[in-house]
Amino acid sequence: METNSQWIDIDTADGKFGAYLSLPRGGKGPGIVLLQEIFGVNQHIRNVADQYAADGYVVIAPDLFWRHGARIELGYDEAGWKRAVELMQATDFATAQQDIAATLKVLRGLDAVGSAKVASLGYCFGGRLSYHTAANGLVDAAVAYYGGGIQNALDRAPEIKVPLLMHFGAADSHIPQEAVKSIAETFDSNEQVEIHVYEGAEHGFNCNHRASYQQRASAQAHGHSLVFLGELL
């Protein structure tokens, strides 16, 4: 997997924060802002960035927890989960959206992206953020993996004007199937919204660093995402 990755700085009114940038071997391509889980821009998220860069995209993953410490990386043990939940609860949602907007401005300004389109792609906490990024009209398309809390923001559904792809696990212990059903019903008449539910898949099924990883669901979801992004960007 040949990519060129590095950490870069992004300026905001509150200061600078880091973002992991991964370029495709060809050096140019459509852009993806990759939105982290509650465990920070850890090895898994960097691997995902490199994976999509290998698929031909310019990927940038902003460190959304930077106000609580630069480049916080957490694992999936009990201590990691405890700290991750604390960080999520301490993160102001509106401020995170501002940081994503700043990241997208940098992404669109890269020579590697040029006039190409950009998408948001998020997991868990980042999946919910990707949904809101689409509602805010900041991207040309959006992908959300097991976005917890989307069911509580369905009042924003009419604001979704771009194609949106959502992935859920049928055995997700964090997102009730009733929530997935309410999301599906809300977007039933919106032909730009695509939802996939994977049998037997738990929360975090895409992360091969976690016990909940399910190879089949992960592969299928990645395939659906590549087709979706390939057609739109």
Image (tube, grey):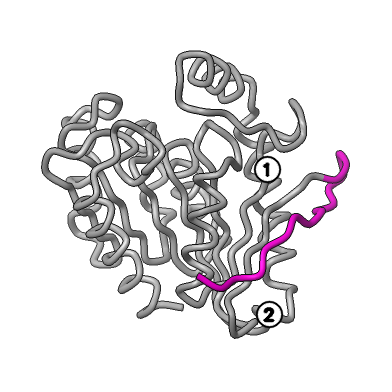
Q: Which residue is mark 2?
A: 112
**What type is the residue that disc 1 sits on?**
Asp
Q: Residue at x 68, y 43 (%)?
A: 63
Whether residue 6 is situated above or below residue 179 in the rendered picture: below
Compare residues 23 and 108 and report the one nearer the observer: 23
Q: Residue furthest left?
A: 199
Q: Residue at x 74, y 26 (%)?
A: 68
136 left or right, relative to 233: right
| Image-quadrant location for residue 164 | bottom left
* Membership of 13 in magenta stretch: yes
> SS at mark 1?
loop
Q: Residue furthest front?
A: 1
The picture places residue 196, in percent across and down from the top left corner, at 20, 53
- Please give the range of residues in magenta: 1-16
Q: Main SS of the magenta segment?
A: strand
The picture places residue 157, in percent across and down from the top left corner, at 36, 49
188 left or right, relative to 104: left
The picture places residue 223, in percent across and down from the top left corner, at 28, 66
Q: Which residue is mark 1?
A: 63
Q: Are marks 2 and 1 in contact (CB under 8 Å)?
A: no
Whether residue 33 is situated above or below residue 201 in the rendered picture: below
- Number of residues whose C-alpha sits closer than 10 Å to that of mark 2, classed few (under 14), some (14–19) or many (20 or more): some
Whether residue 40 is situated above or below residue 102 in the rendered picture: above
Which mark is first along the chain, 1 or 2? 1
Compare residues 21 and 127 and report the one nearer the observer: 21
> SS at mark 2?
loop
